[in-house]
Image (cartoon, rainbow, N blue to C red):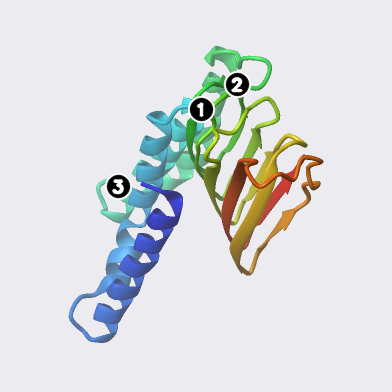
Amino acid sequence: MRGRTFIGILFIALGIGFLLDRMDIISFSTLISTYWPAILILIGASQLFSRGHSSVSGLILIFIGLFFLLRKLDILPADISKYFWPSLLILLGIVVIFGRPRNTGIPVSREDILNHFVIFSGLENRCVSQDFKGGNATAIFGSIDLDLRDADLRDEGAFLDLTTVFGGISIKVPDRWKVAVTGTPLFGGWENKTRKPSDTSQNQPELKIRCFAMFGGIEIKN
């Protein structure tokens, strides 16, 4: 699912829920106040099964979400809260000691179509595709740094869909690329810092970028 679609569906679902609450059909506010930790569990699970993410942040989010959900449902004893922070510190310590060392350098991708989605985390990637077709990148409460300077566009050009909510996306493109950027800023913004290529022939392939920035920023540069 594209990030823009995910955010749109989330807003629609919340709007319908609060509307039904105002109409006294369901008690949506009660459901949200009770089951909001399930959102942390879902985010953590998505990070466990997503490429380019560390499983550590996913496990920590699942741990926090489970703790608060079980506490909200009165499954855990009332006095268990005083053990939460010590337990979290112990978990972090175990991760630091026994966690696998991170690979040095920025991961390299040869995929022609990109699909990056980060929540409460960050991602760096260098794409070296020689037939780049575009894709989409979404950062929610996180950041994405994408380096395309060693990639080549396909002859028909490419389309890249960028979405950020309370986060940031930075894209680096080659000097030779023709770039066209459009976008919708909502309490955020995007900026195209790319230079006009020396080759301005009509047949030159073009990278078209569509931006959606909500309480965040998107930067495209050479």
Q: How many labels does the image show?
A: 3
Report the mark closest to the observer, 2 or 1. Answer: 2
Q: What residue type is labelled 2?
A: Pro
Q: Which of 129 and 35 is in front in this view?
A: 129
Mark positioned earlier in the residue sequence (2 or 1): 1
Q: Nearer the viewer, residue 157 or 105?
A: 157
Image quadrant occupied by the C terminus: top right
Residue 80 visible (yes or no): no
Report the mark closest to the observer, 3 or 2. Answer: 2
Q: Which label sits on residue 107?
A: 2
199 left or right, relative to 158: right
Residue carrying label 3: 70
The crowd level at tag 1 (other Cα within 10 Å; few <14, some 14-19, many 20+) is some
Q: Which residue is drawn at 34% across and 69% down?
A: 12
The crowd level at tag 3 (other Cα within 10 Å; few <14, some 14-19, many 20+) is some
Q: Which secondary structure lies at badge 1? A: loop
Image position, residue 187 (x, y; %) = 63, 69
Residue carrying label 1: 52
